[in-house]
Image (cartoon, rainbow, N blue to C red):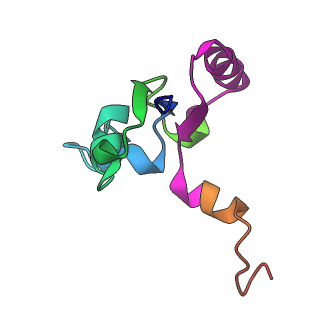
Amino acid sequence: MPDEVRRVAVFALGGTIAMTPASTGGVIPALSAEDLIAAVPGLAETGIEISVDDFRRLPGASLGFDDITALAEAISAALADGVVITQAVTVAAGYTDHPTAEHP
């Protein structure tokens, strides 16, 4: 029996990981979900079927409860074996299981 293709849905919300310099100064969340996926070395060779959704393109502090509720609904509707949500890397790094000097 052939191996079943794994499907992963990627939802991009913007945030730190999507930031690029703005022409007016500062940074803006400009990178798309496709841009972020394209930056992962070797991902295309895994055989995983990846769908991307530029769900929001907002700074992390601009996301509200309505955005998160809508995201939950979109995830529930996604036909995928797994889901990846991209958002503020600096915030997510604080919630890992890896101990640090500040959080043993």
Q: Residue at x 55, y 38 (%)?
A: 84
Question: Could you say which is closer to the camera, residue 54 or residue 14?
Answer: 54
Specify the quadrant of the image occupied by residue 60: top right
Specify the quadrant of the image occupied by residue 70: top right
The magenta region covers: 62-91
65 on left or right of 75? right
- How many labels sit on residues? 0
18 on left or right of 62? left
From what the image shows, is residue 78 above or below residue 4? above
Residue 1 x %, y %:
51, 28
From what the image shows, is residue 41 above or below residue 86? below
Q: Residue furthest front?
A: 1
Question: Could you say which is closer to the camera, residue 23 or residue 96?
Answer: 96
Q: Residue at x 29, y 56 (%)?
A: 41
Residue 72 x %, y %:
69, 21
Residue 44 x %, y %:
29, 43
Residue 64 falls within the magenta-colored stretch: yes
